[in-house]
Amino acid sequence: MNNSDLVKRDLSVLWHPCTQMKDHEWLPMIPIRRAEGIWLEDYDGRRYLDAISSWWVNLFGHANPDINAAVQQQAQTLEHVMLAGFTHEAVVELSERLVQLTPAGLERCFYADNGSAAVEVALKMSFHYWRNKGHTRKTRFITLENSYHGETLGALAVGNVQLYKDTYAPLLMQTISVPSPDCFYRQPGESCAAYSERMFQPMRAALERHAEEVCAVIVEPLVQCAGGMRMYDPVYLKLLRAACDEYGVHLIADEIAVGFGRTGTLFACEQAAVSPDFLCLSKGLTGGYLPLSVVLTGDQVYQAFYDDYGSLKAFLHSHSYTGNALACRAALATLDLFQQRDTLAANRSLAAAMARATADLRDHPQVAEVRQTGMILAIEMIKNKFERIPYPWQERRGLRVYEHGLANGVLLRPLGNVVYFMPPYIIEPEQIALLAEVARQGIDKAVAD
């Protein structure tokens, strides 16, 4: 079999995600035959460096032997059992370890099977908590501009990236949106911390005005990933935690993309020394192997649902594959690798290498900013650097970088005009140098006319 054979079969039966399928009349689809480490290989033998961890999920490389062995061993005894009225060792052990690893006060784990589903769980659980406590006016959520929390209707409603949201607006609940602390918009000479602190005022005003009707504030800690890898300072989270406590509103931390070491700490909230009321995790949870998500919350929330059946206070939310044994075992193997490799320390070195490899791009006339938080680095192309005029989205400049990357053995998938690196943690410095060089060439081509 070769690439063209499989692509022809694919296009006769598949509808791919986040894709205008008509593009594939001229944009080649890449069928992957196998993968190992940071490399993907197609049916014609060409290899591609997976610079975006296959949509941010792969932490320790493809076909990782340790995770492979753990999943294979689990498959010999139990592949899945429903988690209503039943349990199994893998899900119990994973829950115990997550409670130990996550910020203090998160003592209960509720599982789902993807990031959007985790956000739905957190939204419903927060609303239902307040209902069980007699606060029936609390029905709304506060969210940040440019935020993204998933594609299901509840998750979409609390996001604010219009590209994803506008079409479905008639189907969505109405939320309260406040300006983002996104440091891209800070004034010349203003620190990111000072700007993020200044931009907390609209959030405080919204809480003061709407606290009686608000269940929770939901944020992506430190990095708004799908919104263009825009970043902000931990001081915002510290202020937000205090204000949520002051006004009696829950804090939902969506760490689906930024959890498990992406920001330099195991969880982004650690950098502000705060604990959310709900912590949503997925993506890297299983090392990129199997779909699994979890919402962690505290015992106070758990106790609000704990009552006789007739009280009708139970949280009647479920997914068929909740707490899947194979996925839980992959997650446990992933957590083992963090300990065995001292991953966070190694990542600091890799993050520094990423910064060095892209340092010259800060002076590029069509690069507005090179920004970085841990193992996430973003390079934003711009039409006019000094007046901050962006390229029109219709020009699809990022797509040119994508095409150049594939032609040179690197998988880059820019977000609009933002080229970003979010590689597996096993990448090596010389591979980072290759990645940076291909991105640099792609950017030069993309802005050439």
Image (cartoon, rainbow, N blue to C red):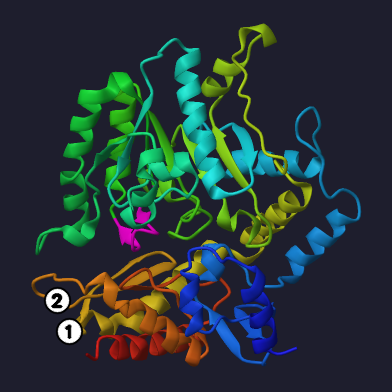
Labels 1 and 2: the sequence-earlier one: 1
Whether residue 274 is visible, yes or no, is: no
Judging depth in this view, the residue of 140 and 36 nearest the camera is: 140
Q: Is residue 370 left or right of residue 219?
A: left
Dot 1, how many residues are within 10 Å of its Cα: few (below 14), some (14-19), or many (20+)?
some
Q: Is residue 437 left or right of residue 198?
A: right
* Residue 310 quadrant: top right
Q: Quadrant of the C terminus?
A: bottom left
Q: Position of residue 130 (x, y in %)?
A: 44, 18
Identify the residue at image location x=63%, y=61%. 287
Q: Residue furthest front?
A: 12
Whether residue 16 is visible, yes or no, is: yes
Q: Residue furthest right?
A: 76
Q: For mark 1, what is the residue? A: 365
Q: Position of residue 393 (x, y in %)?
A: 27, 70
The residue segment tinted magenta is 220-231
Dot 2, how many residues are within 10 Å of its Cα: few (below 14), some (14-19), or many (20+)?
some
Judging depth in this view, the residue of 275 and 220 nearest the camera is: 220
Q: Main secondary structure of the magenta part?
A: loop
**Looking at the picture, does residue 315 appear above or below residue 339?**
above
Q: Are the residues tagged 1 and 2 within 8 Å (C-beta)?
A: yes
Q: Quadrant of the N terminus?
A: bottom right
**Looking at the picture, does residue 189 appear above or below residue 318?**
below
Identify the residue at image location x=64%, y=47%. 113
Question: Which residue type does callout 1 highlight?
Answer: Pro
Q: Position of residue 302 (x, y in %)?
A: 58, 22
Q: For mark 2, what is the residue? A: 385
Judging depth in this view, the residue of 342 and 322 nearest the camera is: 322
The question of residue 218 being in magenta is answered with no
